Amino acid sequence: MAAPHVLIVEDEASQREILAYNLAAEGYGVTRAETGDEALTLFRESQPDLVVLDWMLPGVSGIEICRQLKRAGEGRAVPVIMLSARTEEQDRVRGLETGADDYVTKPYSVAELMARVRAQLRRSRPGSVGQTLTYDDISLDPESYRVHRDTREIKLGPTEFRLLATFMEKPGRVFSREQLLDRVWGRDIYVDSRTVDVHVGRLRKALGVHGGADPIRTVRGAGYSLG
Ligand code: CA
């Protein structure tokens, strides 16, 4: 499946680069924003899986950004880790009250921050950090690349595997063809959206090879969902 993508919002260049370097070393995709306004624009454009957000920013503050992200439809599900030089308990509470999912005080240890990033992703995108995903009688192990349906192994090509992993991370959620292209093929690759239909067809066929109902639902005019 596509590696998780992290949006870093930090106005201090050296801090931003340290974060970007360490996140990239963990295999994550990285987008950098220097100001609040830039953060909001890049959030929409890069559709990150997680945001690391500095509290003290010139212009729109981190608190306000967090509030806006958590208000916006799809953005609400994206975890936000707030960074702050403030240490008072009251500030921490205020940070969490704006909807931040975690709060880290500067100066922080990079190892600790990376652990917290992983913890948030384990919750929001479990497959991307190696957790086995299950849905009904289907299980998918992202580390061994194995898929089973009811005890029997299902053989999938790499694209079908990533497609199934994307569906299994959010059962019931309807993905548009464009969203599937972004998550499964990657955001910089041009693929015709009909390609999605072809691979969904292959995935359905593979999942049904030993019998069982078709778990993938076609939502006319919208896309596909699992269940
Ligand atoms: Ca700052």
Image (cartoon, rainbow, N blue to C red):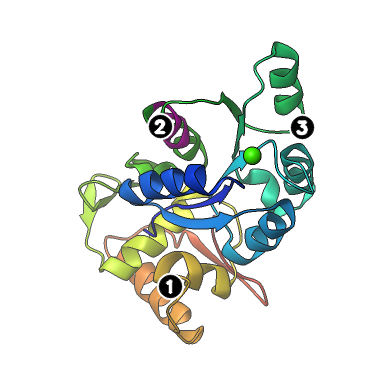
Give the x, y percent position of residue 14.
48, 45
For badge 3, the amino acid type reads Thr
Quadrant holding the C terminus: bottom right
Callouts 3 and 2 close, C-beta under 8 Å:
no
Name which residue lies at 74% across and 57% down: 37
Give the x, y percent position of residue 183.
47, 64
From the image, state whether disc 2 or disc 1 is nearer to you.
2
From the image, state whether disc 3 or disc 2 is nearer to you.
2
Q: Residue 200 carries which label?
A: 1
The answer to which of marks 2 and 1 sits earlier in the sequence is: 2
Residue 137 in sight here = no
Density class for disc 3 (Cα within 10 Å; few <14, some 14-19, many ≥20) is: some
Residue 27 against residue 124 in the figure, above or below: below
Callouts 1 and 3 close, C-beta under 8 Å:
no
Image quadrant of residue 201? bottom left
Callouts 2 and 1 close, C-beta under 8 Å:
no
The residue beneath circle 3 is: 98
The residue beneath circle 2 is: 110
Q: What stretch is highlighted in magenta?
A: 112-118
For badge 2, the amino acid type reads Val
Give the x, y percent position of residue 126.
43, 41
For badge 1, the amino acid type reads Val
